Each structure stands twice: as structure tokens, then as C-alpha cells.
Image: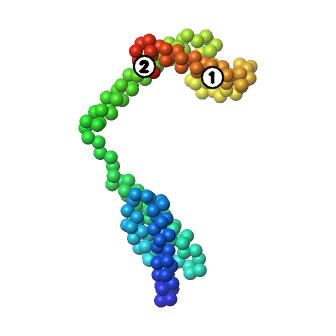
Amino acid sequence: MASIDVEYLQLVTRHQPAIYGYIRSLAPGSDIEDILQETNLVLWEKAASFQPGTNFKAFAFRIAHFKTLEALRSEKRRHWLVFDSDLMASIADRQAGEDHLAEGQQAALRQCLLALSDEEQGLIRSRYSQRKTVREIARETGRTEGALQQLYFRLRNALRTCIESRLAREGGGA
């Protein structure tokens, strides 16, 4: 048993630089020495379960992998971001402005959709409200998928241009 302990000690010692490098590659910026120390503790605890003649490096790297993940999870829990009240108010104000912009975009989209023909409105409804595939719509309308894809491309461009134009006229920006 004492010879196995010496052999195991030699394996652990010989592979320290490789284990350190492996941990560093998984968690740059973390406390590598602490993770290595935790890994070494588990290596000693599992010394009896290691089979001499098998791949020690793979055995050690697996333990290092789990210890690194454990350390990263622990680090993540410790480092919650804390915002001051001014920053939170600034974020809320910005969100309110974005909500207002989105409302203007929605109103412009509704108006632009009304400017389309009934057939074009039906195609838009089938694709985006009913979530039908181009293939399904092609079967229903007797058109080819390619022709429908081109039509949807033109319709999307026309709607985008219409929305941008309306927003620019109303001072909503695009």
C-alpha cells in the first residue's frame, strides 16, 4: 500500500502544471490556486479509487473540471450586480422612452397594413398571425414557394419604408 501512495504522490506532483493549466483554461480570471487546492484535496480523497496503470491525467482533469464548475457557480452567486438608485431610474426612463417608440411603430404598422390590398393583408395574416409556412400558403393559394417568398420580401420592404416614412413625418424617428 505504501508503494501505491508513493506512486500516486508522484503522479499528482508530476501533473500539477498540467492540472493548473487546465483549470486556468476553464476559468481565466478566477482564483486558480484555490481551485487547484480543492482539486488536490479530492485527488487525495480518491487516491484509493484510482487504478494504477490507467490514465491519471484524465482522472485528474475530470476532478479539476468539476471543481472548476463548482467554483464558478459559487463565484457567480457571490458577485450579484448591485445597481444604485440613479442607475435604476435611468434604466426605467430609457425603457419608458423605448415603450413610447414601440407604440409609435405599432401605430405606423397598423396604418401601413391598411394601405395594402385585401389579398396582401390576407397573405400577411396567414404568415405572421396564423404562423403558416410558406409551403402551406403556396398550397392554399396555388402559387409557387419561390413566388411567395419574393412577394413577402417585397411586402416587408414596402411596410418598412412606409413605417419609416410615417415615423419621420410624425417626429417619432426610426
Q: Residue at x 37, y 62 (%)?
A: 31
Res 154 → quadrant: top right
Residue 106: x and y in percent read 46, 19
Q: Are marks 2 and 1 in contact (CB under 8 Å)?
A: no
Residue, far bottom? 2
Residue labelled with disc 2: 173
- Residue 35, horizontal then vertical, whole percent: 40, 66
Q: Secondary structure at mark 2?
A: loop
Look at 55% across and 70% down and name the residue there: 58
Q: Position of 135 compared to 84: left or right? A: right
The residues bearing labels 2 and 1 have C-alpha atoms spaced at a distance of: 23 Å
Q: Position of residue 54 (x, y in %)?
A: 59, 77
Location of mark 1 (residue): 153
Image quadrant assignment for residue 82? top left
Residue 9, position as x, y percentages in the image: 47, 81
What sort of colour scheme is used for the picture? rainbow
Please tell me which residue is depicted at 54% across the width and 19% down the height of the picture: 160
Number of other residues with Cα within 10 Å of mark 2, as a class: few under 14, some 14 to 19, many 20 or more? some
Instruction: Judge whether residue 66 can be spotted in this image.
Output: no
